[in-house]
Image (cartoon, rainbow, N blue to C red):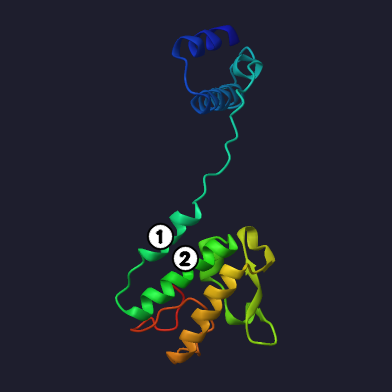
């Protein structure tokens, strides 16, 4: 009965998330016992209300923390370090997911007349395509990286952020 379950919850006093998991597990068990084992049960956990969880604001990095993060980037070569710094700056400047950025191809970048990138199309969660206007930080990071990439002679890869050498040269990170 629900009062026994409530008494257990009151004695145990779990955190809100744990409380919800317990209630969910009990509901699954009650459903199984009723449908599969064909037992006649009281409504039990279905009479209990779920505890509401607090919705917390996401934590974000300050500008100083992002600067420290970018400054801390190292690579096996100066070119790799510059690529990785551009990648982190671009992530910061766009708010994209890492999978969206690593899947970004040259075809998905729109350039202004002066050759500066200003908009991208990314494929996000659920295969949803979205268009993003680049912030000045993202424009600078992407533009500088594309120029360096071209100077390195790696203009053949369709992927913006790709391996610079070795067997995987040109493949996405």
Check residue 134 in the rendering and tell me which mark sits there, or answer none: none
Asked if 100 appears above or below 76 in the picture, the reply is: above
Residue 55's image quarter?
Answer: top right
Looking at the picture, how far across and down is residue 9, in whole percent? Answer: 50, 14
Dot 1 and dot 2 residues touching (CB under 8 Å)? yes
Looking at the picture, how far across and down is residue 73, in whole percent? Answer: 36, 66
Q: Which residue is mark 2?
A: 88
Looking at the picture, how far across and down is residue 6, in whole percent? Answer: 55, 11
Which of the two residues, 14 or 153, is positioned nearer the viewer here? Answer: 153
Q: What's the residue at 47%, 15% (across, down)?
A: 13
* Image quarter of the C terminus: bottom left
Q: Which residue is mark 1?
A: 69
Asked if 104 appears above or below 169 in the picture, the reply is: above
Q: Nearer the viewer, mark 1 or mark 2?
A: 1
Asked whether residue 1 is in view, the answer is no
Asked whether residue 116 is in view, the answer is yes
The crowding category of the residue bearing disc 2, from other C-alpha atoms within 10 Å (few below 14, some 14 to 19, many at least 20), is: some
């Amino acid at each position: 009965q629900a009062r026994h379950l409530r008494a257990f919850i009151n004695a145990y006093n779990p955190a809100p998330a744990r409380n919800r998991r317990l209630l969910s597990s009990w509901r699954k068990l009650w459903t199984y016992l009723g449908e599969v084992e064909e037992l006649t049960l009281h409504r039990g956990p279905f009479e209990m209300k779920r505890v509401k969880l607090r919705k917390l604001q996401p934590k974000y990095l300050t500008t100083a923390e992002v600067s420290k993060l970018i400054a801390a980037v190292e690579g096996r070569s100066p070119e790799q370090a510059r690529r990785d710094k551009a990648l982190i700056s671009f992530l910061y400047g766009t708010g994209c997911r890492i999978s969206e950025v690593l899947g970004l191809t040259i075809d998905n970048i729109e350039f202004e007349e002066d050759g500066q990138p200003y908009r991208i199309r990314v494929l996000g969660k659920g295969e949803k395509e979205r268009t993003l206007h680049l912030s000045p930080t993202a424009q600078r990071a992407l533009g500088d990286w594309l120029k360096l990439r071209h100077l390195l002679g790696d203009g053949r890869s369709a992927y913006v952020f790709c391996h610079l050498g070795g067997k995987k040269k040109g493949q996405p990170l």
